């Protein structure tokens, strides 16, 4: 089986109703990212940060995976597919994708503020002040905030380096270090980009561009890959 590595960004989930940060009408127009998504924000106003992520979690509970998520999950029948996602939602999991690496954390989990190894599945429940880990410390969202290290980055780089096919879906490629992952794909790998917007790709190689939203773009990708690798549906 060919190794298919997929990097998914906010555009992957926007068709499911997940509000993005960067788009017009996005969360950055309503919230200052420095006030809700940084360690400093947590220290300054824990209640605001908790409220922000509680709202995101409630929203996620009402959202459903779109055809793009389903299309990627279906590709597991024909490819060794690894998803690396910048998204903190659980929509890939809900449709049965089995190999998912969350670069920026997971909204449905909480973790200890004194021991990063203590991570708890909380589903779509709120995290409130006074909700403590087993060591008695306040729980925080299991999210990689701006200014924090990305613990899963080394693993993501290794996965990108194994790709026969590397696909970027719905990512602006503006947020580093994730944006640089495409540069770790081997020279032999075919590179693909699915996004309705113009995205600057900093790689001196041919990139096949499908200028569509995720759901339609992934359907086109499927057709192209099936044709290239002579796969019958």
Image (cartoon, rainbow, N blue to C red):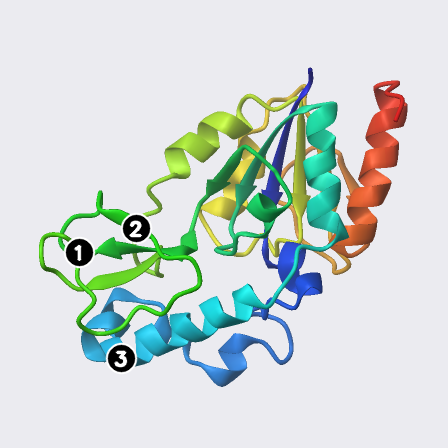
Q: Is residue 173 left or right of residue 73?
A: left
Q: Is residue 190 visible?
A: no
Would you say the residues marked 2 and 1 are in contact, meaning their CB atoms lie under 8 Å apart? yes
The relative height of residue 141 versus residue 149 in the rendered view (above or below) is below
Q: Quadrant of the N terminus?
A: top right
Binning the other alpha carbons within 10 Å of mark 2 as few (below 14), some (14 to 19) or many (20 upward) gives: some
In this rendering, the label closer to the viewer, 3 or 2: 2
Q: Give the mark nearest the N terminus, 3 or 2.
A: 3
> Which numbered marker is on residue 120?
2
SS label for mark 1: loop
Q: Is residue 150 left or right of residue 177?
A: left
Task: Give the quarter of the figure containing the C terminus.
Answer: top right
- Element marked by disc 3: helix
Vertical order, 215 against 84 (above or below): below
Q: Which one is nearer the viewer's eye here, 71 or 94? A: 94
Q: Which residue is mark 3?
A: 47
Query: Residue 64: horizontal and vertical position, in percent?
Result: 65, 60
Q: Mark 2 falls on what kind of element?
A: strand
Q: CA distance from mark 1 to mark 3?
A: 17 Å
Q: Nearer the viewer, mark 1 or mark 3?
A: 1
Q: Residues within 10 Å of mark 3 (few under 14, many from 20)?
A: some
Q: In the rendering, at what x and y percent does residue 184 appear?
A: 53, 30
Q: Nearer the viewer, residue 118 or 30?
A: 118
Instruction: Identify residue for label 1.
Output: 133
Q: Is residue 227 visible?
A: yes
* Marks 1 and 3, the one that precedes in the sequence: 3
């Amino acid at each position: 089986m060919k190794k298919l590595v997929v990097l998914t960004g906010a555009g992957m989930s926007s068709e499911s109703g997940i509000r993005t940060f960067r788009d017009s009408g996005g969360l950055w127009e309503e919230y200052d990212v420095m006030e809700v998504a940084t360690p400093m924000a947590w220290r300054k106003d824990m209640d605001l940060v908790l409220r922000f992520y509680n709202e995101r979690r409630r929203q996620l509970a009402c959202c459903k995976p779109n055809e793009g998520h389903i299309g990627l999950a279906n590709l597991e029948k024909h490819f060794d597919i690894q998803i690396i996602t910048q998204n903190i939602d659980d929509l890939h999991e809900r449709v049965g994708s089995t190999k998912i690496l969350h670069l920026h954390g997971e909204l449905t989990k909480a973790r200890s503020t004194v021991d990063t190894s203590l991570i708890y599945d909380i589903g779509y429940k709120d995290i409130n002040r006074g909700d403590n880990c087993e060591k008695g410390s306040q729980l925080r969202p299991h999210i990689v905030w701006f200014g924090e290290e990305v613990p899963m980055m080394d693993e993501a780089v290794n996965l990108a380096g194994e790709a026969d096919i590397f696909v970027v879906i719905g990512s602006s490629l503006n947020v580093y270090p994730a944006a640089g992952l495409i540069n770790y794909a081997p020279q032999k790998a075919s590179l693909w980009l699915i996004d309705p917007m113009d995205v600057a790709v900093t790689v001196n190689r041919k990139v096949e561009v499908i200028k569509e939203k995720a759901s339609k773009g992934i359907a086109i990708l499927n057709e192209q890959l099936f044709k290239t690798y002579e796969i019958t549906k």
